[in-house]
Image (tube, rainbow, N blue to C red):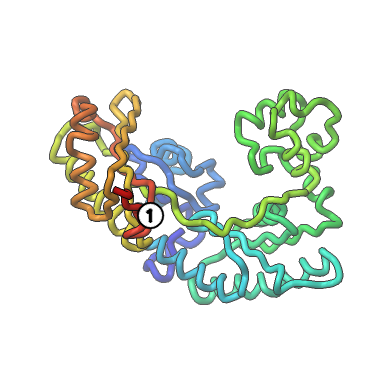
Amino acid sequence: MPRSNSWGHPEWRGKPVIVGAQPTQRGVVATANYEARKFGVHSAMPSVTAGRLCREGIFVRPRMDVYRRESEDITEILAASGAFIEQVSIDEAYLDLTSQCQAGDADASLQLALPIARHLQQRIGCERQLTCTVGIGANKLLSKLASDLQKPEGLVLITEQEKVRRLRPLPVGKLYGVGDVTGQILGQAGLRTIGDLRDYQGDLAALVGSSAARLKNFSLGVDDRPLAADTEAKSISCEETFPHDTRDARVLMECLWNQAAEIEAQLHEAKKEASTIQVKVRYFDFTTLTRQTTLAEPMADAKDIYATATAYPLLQRHKLLGRTIRLLGLGVSNLQAPGARQLPLF
């Protein structure tokens, strides 16, 4: 969310703020503060719906360049703790403090993480004027669940001794890997809480297949997933929903050029080149098509990405521009360091 003092909007404090398209325009909510969420506003909701639910909401356009810089500054603060870091998204990360927090038993070690977490919260609040929520646990599952218990500025520790009791009343959908479909299947079987899942004596595999053993372990607070050292982005993409459906070639080409320029900036920042270019088109009737091509030579320049997207291999060959368009997107993947391409032997 915007920092009220640095963005010059202290009057927004305590008011519902929604990041995304204006409620009079087509588009979706990127995120919303807790005041807006009280009205039922959430990420990926159409902005029109958000405006209807929260008539006093303050809608602001996303500024991804600002968010990325902020994320980098906060990551530097986290790295100063000496922790091993797995960055999950622009605003979420796991920290492994095992080397700094070793005591006689697991729970004593977890207690040693509390002052480090408080210090990080204070630094982020003082230096970046942002709140953050911290969850502490012996694994990724428990720390994530702990971070969800007291938002927006909580600090919650789930010990090994109390983990089964703390998890028991939580909705089963809180577990990693339980989405809407799996949650519905479990609910139909009467498994609505993590405690229900833990106590279930039936054939769990008949309900969720190969995920059964993992979910059973999760219900016990057991999670052996390691922190991932390779957290580099595998792809970069941009997309835009137009205020009005259009088939104006000038508007569409300008949109693609701006997206190519944004992708070039991100590739330059990541010191990467891309071999695969993808175009995404959503028409007025919500039919969505994606087409991609993989090139012999990787590229990073906006003009090359734009030319590939608009030329014969993609838009022209697949005749994607013959109908009225609602959304247009551009992406790249197969990222690699410059000069990393393997040359042919002959």
On screen, residue 175 versus residue 5, left or right, reads right
* SS state under label 1: strand
In the image, residue 121 sits, relative to residue 182, either above or below, namely below
The location of residue 146, given as percent across then percent down, is 70, 55
Which residue is at a point 68% across and 68% down the rendered structure image?
97
Q: Residue 22 occupies which quadrant of the picture?
A: top left
Residue neighbourhood size for the residue with mark 1, other residues' Cα within 10 Å, grouped as few (<14), some (14–19), many (≥20): some
The location of residue 176, given as percent across then percent down, is 65, 43
In the image, residue 102 sits, relative to residue 222, either above or below, namely below
Which residue is at a point 36% across and 57% down the rendered structure image?
340
Q: Specify the amino acid type for callout 1.
A: Gln
* Residue 96 appearing in the image: yes
The location of residue 153, given as percent across then percent down, is 62, 62
On screen, residue 319 versus residue 344, left or right, reads left
Query: Which residue is outermost to the left?
Result: 250
- Given residues 316 and 282, the one toward you in this image is 316
The location of residue 201, given as percent across then percent down, is 86, 29
Q: Which residue is mark 1?
A: 336
